[in-house]
Each structure stands twice: as C-alpha cells, then as structure tokens.
Image (spheres, grey):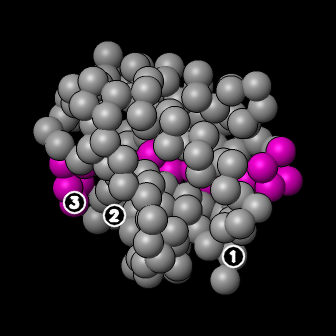
Amino acid sequence: MEHVHVESFKVIGVPVRTSDKFGKSIVDAGITWFNFEKNDLYQKIPNKTSDYIYIVDTDHEEGNLGEYTIVIGCAVSSFDSIPEGMVGKDVPSGYYTKYTVQGRATGEIVEKWKEIWKKDAENPRKYSTDFAIYKGKYPFDLGNIEGEIYIAESK
C-alpha cells in the first residue's frame, strides 16, 4: 500500500449500478466483465490511451452502505464518440491509496477488495471515485491478473 497523487483522466465503458450489500458488487462486476469480454466491447471503445482495462467505482450514495456505479472500460483521450450502451466518466485528480494485486479474478482480486473494505475505518475513503487498472494483453488470463487498485483518500 502506498499514497500517490493521480492526475485526472477519462474512461469509457459499460456501467452497472450496484452496492456492496450481500456481495452484490462482486457478482455484478463479474457479470459485467463477462459481458464486456463476450461482446468484445474492448474493441468498440475509441481513442484508447492504453491496452489496460479500468474499473471505475463512482456516483456513490451514502458511503459504504449505498449504491454506486461500476464502469468497466478503457482510459481514453476524449469523449468525442461514446458507443451506444456505454458511458464516459472523468476520474478526478487527487490523492489515492494504491494497492497492488496479482492472482485469480475470483480469488486474490476479490480478497484484496474485501481487505480494502475492512480497512475503511483506518484509511477513510472519500466515496467519490475509486478505480482499478488491470494490466496485460486483452483478453486477460483470469487465472493470473496483475493490477493496481486506487482508493480516493479523504484528505
């Protein structure tokens, strides 16, 4: 874990409204990721600035108890052409707590998120916009994903 400053950037991707109640966000993110790959939506995103997949958590209601939007997509240079069924989201500049993660999508990645959620009391979150970057060549080997998770700090 380290504290870093991140400059703002843009992401285009597929949204899903969810919450952390009863593990709903893990299921919703998994289904959305599956549909993202199955429908080859990666190829439909214009103006990509990297080959990485981004997952953005934004539009939070009521801190850790409310709903929020997950967007699975790619960093882009502009919102000039957003494909139907997708949205554009700005990730604001600011200070984030950065976690590195590697492993299975349904194993180590999920466990890292659970660890982060448990640390909310000691590392207060803004509940504004958090994001993860999953690196490697798309489509991923879901048995061995490498990435970084960034949690907006409440400083």
Q: Amino acid at mark 2?
A: Ser
Q: Residues within 10 Å of mark 3 (few under 14, many from 20)?
A: some
Magenta-span inclusion, residue 13: no
Point out which mark residue 88 bears: none
- Which of the two discs, 1 and 2, sits closer to the camera? 1
Point out which mark residue 49 bears: 3
Q: Residue at x 25, y 31 (%)?
A: 144
Q: Amino acid at mark 3?
A: Thr
Q: Which residue in the structure is indicated by mark 2?
A: 78
Q: Which residue in the structure is indicated by mark 1?
A: 154
Q: Residues within 10 Å of mark 1 (few under 14, many from 20)?
A: few
Q: Amino acid at mark 1?
A: Ser
Q: Residue at x 42, y 34 (%)?
A: 108
Q: Looking at the rendering, which quadrant does residue 130 occupy?
A: bottom right
Magenta highlight range: 47-65
Label 1 SS: loop
Question: Looking at the image, is mark 3 or mark 2 earlier in the sequence?
Answer: 3
Q: Is residue 4 above or below residue 90?
A: below
Viewed as shown, does residue 118 lie left or right of 131?
Answer: right
Residue 54: give x, y in percent of width and height. Answer: 38, 48
Front residue of this view, candidates 22 and 131: 22
The residue at the far top in this view is 38
Label 2 SS: loop
